[in-house]
Image (spheres, helix red, strand yellow):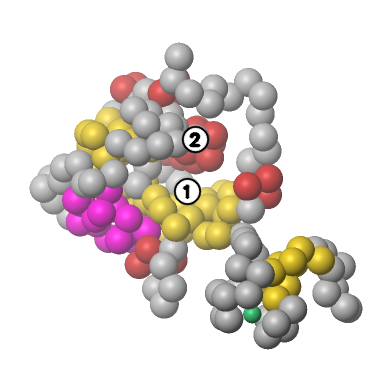
Amino acid sequence: MKFCSQCGSRVELRIPEGDNLPRFVCNACDTIHYENPKIVAGCIPEWENQILLCKRAIEPRRGLWTLPAGFMENKETTAEAALRETLEEAKAQAEIIDLYALFNIPHISQVYLMFRARLLNLDFGPGAESLEVQLFHEHEIPWEDLAFPVIHETLKRYYAERKQQRYTLQIGNIRPTKTYKLTKP
Ligand SMILES: [Zn+2]
């Protein structure tokens, strides 16, 4: 951040009095611009024994597969955000079954909330951010071509539980891994 969104003056990075972390502070209007983690909400859209994945049309990780998910907008609920992203990325209508997983990703200051959801029909297709949208059985999941570690972790836990048809809320932390490919080879 270079300029104050309140008054347009230049901001400086410093620790405000009484605080313990550096913040962007405007010395003209005294606004402190706090930056906090972002919430990403998404779905595991189910249809019988299959789930819906999207092949990303945008960077990062263009061409790799992901669950429909994205940043929450202001004034919506987490479930609304998850369903909106499913509609935008997969043009799919779904209904929420339950919250399935919460993952903290502290090194990029994000929190993922993933819901299990039921597809309402088979009328889906790629939205603007997707190249393809497809249903997968478990044995067809492109494990080597998943876009993000958090998606890999979500699906790994989901299929481990699916065998018993008993789902419990998953909570975990995703840490940076050197081995994870940043781009498709
Ligand atoms: Zn200002």
* Residue underneath mark 2: 148
Give the CA separation, mark 1 to mark 2. 22 Å
**Residue at 39% over, 50% down:** 69
Question: Hey, which residue is sitting farthest bottom in the picture?
Answer: 29
* Mark 2 secondary-structure assignment: loop
Q: Is residue 178 above or below residue 40?
A: above
Q: Is residue 100 above or below residue 156?
A: below
* Residue underneath mark 1: 167
Placement of the N terminus among the 4 image quadrants: bottom right
Q: Is residue 98 magenta?
A: no
Locate residue 93: give its quadrant: bottom left
Question: Do tag 1 and tag 2 residues touch (Cβ < 8 Å)?
Answer: no
Q: Position of residue 113 (x, y in %)?
A: 50, 56
Does residue 146 appear in this view? yes
Q: Nearer the viewer, residue 148 or 5?
A: 5
The disc placed on residue 105 is none
- For the record, the magenta segment spans 82-97
Q: What amino acid type is highlighted by mark number 2?
A: Phe
